[in-house]
Image: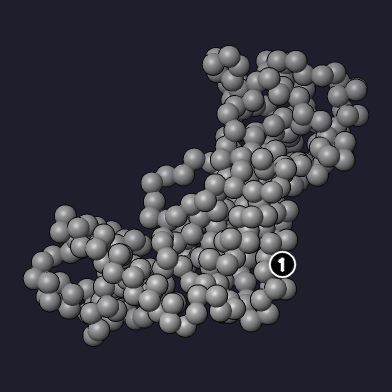
């Protein structure tokens, strides 16, 4: 087997921490992945990976080799792109993931522009209110809201969002403006179980935190259902600011407890490391990042 291919397989195994995930990512059989790693270790005369029943971890020697292997593969990719023309029109399949409402409101317009400009491309949009393992599921580009964990993925910051408490003007007129978090106990609350939002609401003012234990009158499984219920005047809900950007602009909802909001959450576009990303991926990232950075509701 070609040494560069073995190197590519090793990098993928190290990043995904699994042989099966690498096989799916590289469209290879699992035995072929195993043979590639064994051949590379034999050629180098050193153990690169430690295998257990659940995980594959990189040895100390493997970590050193991983850094060099990435650089070599990036240089090979750069040379290939220079030969075929880096500015050639993007083509092929691209997969993108984002939270449901963010995907619908912000990512889908970017996808539409991308598909219109580049007719030889296809996009698989995976919008889910959970954190998707992009390497494990073979996704090219994703949107992440919140602080990023250490990762082999590259990230470009495109904006920030806030956790906001909102209600309809009609509800607030009837029940009064909420002035402090402890007054929430006197109101009807709408709670969404989507994503990773806590079932308790945390607030901060002048560095002092307070936690409100929720007693929901209405519990829903999606954020858009919570937003719609609030618009209908059923109570107050707490969502991310982008999820109610249109409703706030239209006057259908109003923010309360703004002085008690927790720090803003960063929004990043994340993608696979370095120049190994193909032209189609880089082109889409540049387009999406530019659109998001110009959106006033995110900045």
Please name whichever residue, 10 or 216, is drawn nearer the observer in this view of the structure.
10
In percent of width and height, residue 126 lies at: 60, 63
Residue drawn 20% across the image and 62% down it: 65
Q: Along the line of sight, which residue is nearer the eye, 118 or 10? A: 118
Mark 1 — residue? 113
Q: Residue furthest bottom?
A: 1
Q: Quadrant of the N terminus?
A: bottom left
Q: Residue furthest left?
A: 45
**For residue 269, above or below residue 198:** below
Instruction: Give me the residue at 36% from left, 80% from top.
Output: 28
Q: Nearer the viewer, residue 222 or 292?
A: 292
Q: Looking at the image, can residue 76 be seen?
A: yes
Please say whether residue 210 is visible from this viewpoint.
no
Q: In the picture, residue 272 is in which quadrant?
A: bottom left
Q: Quadrant of residue 89?
A: bottom right
* Front one among 72 and 259: 72
Residue shown at the point (85%, 32%) measured from the top left: 168
- Within 10 Å of the Cα at label 1, are there few (<14), some (14-19), or many (20+) other Cα atoms? few
- Residue 184 found in image quarter: top right
Percent of width and height locating residue 97:
58, 60
For label 1, the SS is helix
């Amino acid at each position: 087997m070609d040494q560069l291919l073995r190197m590519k397989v090793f990098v993928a195994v190290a990043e995904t921490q699994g042989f099966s995930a690498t096989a799916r990512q590289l469209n290879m059989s699992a035995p072929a992945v195993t043979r590639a790693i064994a051949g590379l270790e034999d050629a180098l005369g050193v153990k690169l990976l430690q295998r257990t029943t659940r995980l594959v971890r990189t040895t100390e020697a493997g970590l050193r080799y991983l850094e060099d292997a990435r650089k070599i593969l990036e240089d090979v990719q750069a040379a290939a792109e220079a030969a075929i023309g880096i500015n050639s029109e993007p083509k092929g399949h691209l997969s993108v993931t984002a939270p449901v409402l963010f995907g619908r409101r912000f990512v889908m317009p970017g996808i539409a522009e991308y598909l219109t400009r580049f007719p030889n491309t296809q996009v698989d949009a995976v919008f889910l209110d959970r954190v998707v393992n992009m390497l494990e599921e073979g996704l090219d580009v994703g949107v992440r809201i919140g602080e990023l964990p250490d990762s082999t993925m590259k990230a470009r910051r495109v904006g920030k969002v806030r956790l906001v408490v909102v209600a309809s003007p009609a509800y607030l007129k009837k029940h009064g403006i909420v002035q402090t978090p402890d007054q929430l106990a006197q109101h009807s609350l709408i709670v969404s179980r989507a994503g990773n939002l806590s079932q308790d609401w945390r607030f901060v003012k002048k560095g002092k935190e307070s936690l409100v234990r929720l007693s929901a009158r209405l519990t829903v499984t999606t954020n858009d259902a919570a937003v719609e219920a609030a618009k209908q005047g059923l109570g107050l809900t707490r969502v991310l600011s982008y999820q109610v950007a249109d409703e706030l602009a239209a006057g259908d909802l109003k923010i309360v407890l703004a002085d008690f909001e927790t720090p803003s959450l960063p929004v990043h576009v994340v993608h696979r490391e370095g120049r190994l990303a193909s032209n189609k991926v880089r082109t889409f990232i540049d387009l999406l990042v530019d659109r998001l950075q110009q959106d006033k509701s995110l900045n």
